[in-house]
Amino acid sequence: MSEILSWVFAVLFVLVVIAWYLSYTAARLDRLHVRLSGTLAALDARLVRRAEAAVELANSGLLDGATSLILANAAAESLEAPSEHGEARELAENDLTEALDLALTPETVSSLRSTALGEDVLARLSSACLRVQLARRFHNDAVTDVRRVRRKWTIRLFHLAGYTPLPHTVEFNDESPEHLTVA
């Protein structure tokens, strides 16, 4: 009788340990998904701020008309792009990066730096571009962490991720114009 009771307790102990491990793993995965949502929201906010800084530069009157128009159009497309990160959003962000690169030539940046308004607008734009780069990196790191955890056999076998789709990294050109960061 005591031997059977020992086996029952041993089996119950193993089941409790397995249940604890599955619960811990599910909670960890949930925390990673929450972190992923936060990084995506932060990236969206930074992208909006970069587009707003570009609109501010385009409307400042410090650039020539054609450059202002190109920059304003690219920023407007970025602001109007779908909030879901997909091909359309990435294309709009690439276009804004390209417009910023074309608009901010070394001569333009040096002439903008000669005025207080131009210096202020460039500082905001430079800060916004840097924050976009950081936010995208943080988001892509969070995606990598979620994907790494979701590859584990226990997550797949016990379906701990539920019906949550596998996240994807956000890829677009977010490089600041090289002359923007040089003071």
Image (cartoon, helix red, strand yellow):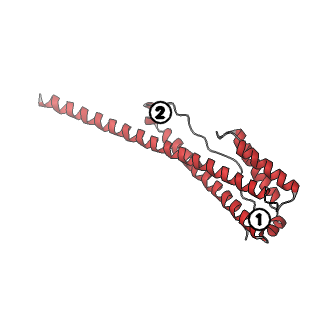
The residue at 82%/60% (across/down) is: 61
Find residue 109 and report its horizontal and vertical position in percent.
Answer: 79, 66
The residue lying toward the viewer, choosing from 146 and 40, is: 40
Relative side of 15 to 24, left or right: left
User: In the orientation shown, which residue stands out farthest toward the left?
Assistant: 1
The foreground one among 168 and 74 is 74
**Quarter holding residue 154:** top left
The residue positioned 45% from the left and 35% from the top of the image is 155
Location of residue 144 with respect to 4 vertically, above or below: below
Disc 1 and disc 2 in contact, CB within 8 angstroms: no
**Residue 164 spot, x, y in % from top left:** 52, 34
Q: Secondary structure at mark 2?
A: helix
Give the residue drawn at x 51%, y 30%: 163
**Secondary element at image label 1:** loop
The residue under label 2 is: 156
Q: Amino acid at mark 2?
A: Arg
As drawn, the label of residue 83 is: none
Earlier sequence position, callout 1 versus callout 2: 2
Give the number of the mark in front: 1 or 2: 1
Which circle marks residue 179 in the picture? 1
Q: Is residue 111 left or right of residue 17?
A: right
Q: Is residue 34 left or right of residue 67?
A: left
Q: CA distance from mark 1 to mark 2?
A: 48 Å
User: Relative to 50, does residue 115 appear above or below in the rendering?
Assistant: below
Relative to 118, is 66 above or below? above
Asked whether residue 174 is in view, the answer is no
Q: Is residue 66 visible?
A: yes
In this rendering, position of residue 20 left or right of residue 183: left
The x and y percentages for residue 89 are 70, 42
The quadrant of the image that shows the C terminus is bottom right
